[in-house]
Image (cartoon, grey):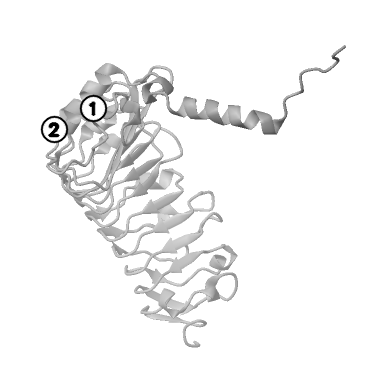
Amino acid sequence: MNTSSTPTPTLSTLLPTLALSLLLFLSLPSHSLSAKPRCHPTDRKILLQIKNSFNDPNPSLPSWNPAITTDCCQWYGVGCDLTTNRVTSISIFSTNLSGQIPASIALLPSLQTLIFRKLPYLTGPIPAAIAQLSNLNMLRLSWTNLSGPVPSFLSQLKNLTFLDLAFNNLNGSIPVELDQLPQLYGIHLDRNELTGPIPDWNFQSGNAPDIYLSHNKLTGPVPKSFGYYNYSTVDLSRNMLSGDLSFMFGLNKTVQIVDFSRNLFEFNLSDVVFPASLTSLDLNHNKIFGSLPAELTTLEFQYLNVSYNRLCGKIPTGGKLQSFDVTSYFHNRCLCGNPLPAC
């Protein structure tokens, strides 16, 4: 009687079969392997309208082409909601796109993030159509050649948490209406051509957004209302602001980074009470007088610069104060002591 049985397959006997199966799988047409396009057809149509609105002789958005893929969720800089398939973000960086931001951007009702950054040929004003993007929470139009005013209609974007219009050619005054954005945690309007005073903002909570207004042509005093709020960062440097700024400090404040340099501020530093949270203080090139308070030795400074003012007296010894070199203290009226020459 033949008692032999079928041998149990081993890995070495299965490898040729597995390799053949893999080869057949990879040879299938690509469309059979890919998922069904997620892009909402209406949004795809609008994206193509946006692309066609730009002057783009050397196409900067080659992937925005249905001939390559009909799924606009796979196009460069486009993000979609996983459930609704609607376009929720457009983020375009460092391309040669030229022209103005088209009004058709407002036809993307689910848009939450809009970023046009480092586009030197993007010109014209910020279009009013952006006010229709009620779901927008991040608006970043920076490092472009946009011009015209900072529009007050931005206050209609009640879900906005971050506004960055820095490094443009925006001019005119800063709209007071920006304080009507209840969820805003950052305002970047630096590196523009803005003029006039800083608005007397009335934020609805005790915390204000981080504020960057440097490198503009702002004038006048800082509104007293700024003293009512807590900030993390305030940068008002390189303007023509003036007056007493001591009210911006206080024992109960939570500010960490302050840059008020290269303005016309004039106040007595001797009596200012600085918060324990302060890690960076830049007051250089102003008209600040008095002496450096001894309490500065208790702060964990990472950066300090009080040069080019009218300070006098001995630099307090201790803490981080002697860790900075003479450039942090020089060109004052009669400031002395380490790291400056002895008194």
Identified at 46% across, 29% down, the residue is 26
Q: Position of residue 102 (x, y in %)?
A: 16, 32
User: Which residue is nearer to you in this view: 174 or 61?
Assistant: 61
Q: Which residue does the numbered mark 1 point to in the structure image?
A: 67
Taking 302 as reference, is 339 above or below it? below
Number of numbered tags placed on the structure image: 2
Q: Position of residue 87 (x, y in %)?
A: 33, 25
Q: Residue furthest right?
A: 1
Taking 10 as reference, is 168 above or below it? below
User: Which residue is nearer to you in this view: 276 or 220?
Assistant: 276
Mark 1: amino acid:
Ala
Identified at 38% across, 59% down, the residue is 259
Q: Which residue does the numbered mark 2 point to in the structure image?
A: 53
User: Which residue is nearer to you in this view: 325 or 45?
Assistant: 45
Quadrant (top left/top right/bottom left/bottom right) for the N terminus: top right
Q: Position of residue 328 (x, y in %)?
A: 43, 74
- Crowding at label 2, few (<14), some or many (≥20) Cα neighbours within 10 Å? some
Between marks 1 and 2, how big is the CA–CA gap? 19 Å
- Residue 175 sits in quarter: top left
Taking 94 as reference, is 102 above or below it? above
